[in-house]
Amino acid sequence: MKLSARKVETAGVGRHGDGRGLFLYVKPTGARSWVLRYQVQGRRHDLGLGAYPDVTLAMARQKATEARRLILEGDDPIAKRRQVQLKTFKDAALELIESKRSGWKSAKHAAQWTSTLEAYAFPNLGPMQVTKIATADVVGALKPIWSQKPETANRVRQRIEAVLDYSSALGIREGDNPARWRGHLDNLLPKPTKVRAVQHHPALPHADISEFMNALSNRSGVSARALTFTILTAARSGETRGMRWAEVDLDGRVWTIPAQRMKAGKEHRVPLTSNAIAQLGPRLDDTELVFGSETKAGKPISDMSMTALLRRMEYNNITVHGFRSSFRDWAGETTSFPREVIEAALAHGIKDKAEAAYARSDLFDKRRDLMQAWTRIATPENLGANVIALS
C-alpha cells in the first residue's frame, strides 16, 4: 500500500515501501530518510533522496519520478549526481561559451567572455563546485574590481549570472541566482554608474572639425584616407577597417555594411558623398579590403593606426570614436534634421520598443542629405585667399 502523510510521521523502525522502489527508512533514533531502489545493467542501487521532514512525501515521489526518467533514458542517477557534484564553475562557463559560440557574430566575442572570466572570475570561482556557489562567493570575486573597474566588473557579474543560469537550466543548480542584480546584489554593491562617472570618448568640438580636416588633408597614406572616410561617414573605425569592395556601390553611391560586421547585428546602408568616395582609392577585386594594410597583404590596417595618426598630428586628447560624438553634437545642436534621422545615421538602435515597432524605414534619402550637409561643414570648399569663412 502507498504511504500516507500520517504513516510517514508515525511509521516505526524499519523500511516502508511506497511502491515502484521508493522506500521510507526509519532508524532506531527516529530519523527518517527516503531511498529509491533501482537496477541498472542487472546491478541494484540505492539512491538517497533526502531526509524527512525536509523532503516531504510529495517531494520524494517527485524526485523518484525524475530519477526513473533518467533510468529510462539510459542514465544512472547516482553516476549523474556524482558528475554534477564534480562540475566546477569553470567547467560550466566553458560549456556555456561553447554552446553560445555559433550564435555570436564574431570569435572576438567568445574570446572576450573567456578572457574576462579567466581574469576576474576563475581565480575565485573557477575551482568551486557550481552547485555550491553562494552570494558571498560572487561578492568576493567582484569587490576587488567593483570600484576600480566598474564597467568591467558589471560585465563580469552579468557573465557569472549567465553561467549560473545555464547550470540551473541543466538541472545542476536549484534556487535563486546569487549573481542577480535587481533585488539582490543591488542591496550589497553600489550601482556601477555611481561608482565613477561614465567616461565618454574624448571628442573634438564640432566647431573645430573644419580646421582639423584641413590639417588631415595634408597627410598621406592609408590611415589618413581611412580616418577621413570614417569621419565623413560617421562610421565606427572597425566598420571602416573591415570594409571590402563588394560592399561598395559606386554608381548608387552606397556602402552596405553586412549584419555580421555591425554592432547591432543588422545590415546598415551608408550614403556616400563625393568627398567620401574620393578617399576609397582605385577599385580592386570585390574580395579586397578597401583600406588594407600597407605592410601585411590581405590584412586590414590595425585598430591603432588611426589613433597613432591623431597622435602624430598632436591631437592627444581625442579618439577616433569621438568623431561620432562630434557629428552627433553638430547635427543635434546646429541642424533641423529629426533625431531619428541622426540616430539612423549613427546606426543606433531605437531603445523604445513601441517606437521601434513602427520604424520600418532606414530613412536613407534623408540621411543622404544629412551626410552631405556634414561633408560641407567638415570639408568646406577653398573659396580663395581673400575670402573668410564665418562659423
Image (cartoon, rainbow, N blue to C red):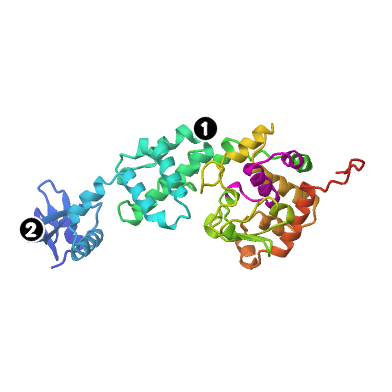
Identify residue type, mark 1.
Gln
Please give the name of the residue rendered at 66% of the width and 64% of the height, measured from the top-left corner.
362
The mark found on residue 148 in the picture is 1
Disc 2 element: strand
Please give the name of the residue rendered at 76% of the width and 56% of the height, measured from the top-left corner.
372
Disc 1 element: loop
Q: Nearer the viewer, residue 3 or 278?
A: 278
Let me know if residue 198 appears in the view: no
Please give the name of the residue rendered at 37% of the width and 55% of the height, measured from the top-left corner.
99
- Residue 90: say if magenta: no
- Residue 222: say if magenta: yes
Residue 163 locus on image (x, y percent): 38, 49
For the residues marked 2 and 1, what is the alpha-carbon distance in whole angstroms? 57 Å
Q: Is residue 97 above or below residue 212?
A: below
Residue 14 locus on image (x, y percent): 8, 54
Location of mark 2 (residue): 43
What range is drawn magenta here?
A: 213-238
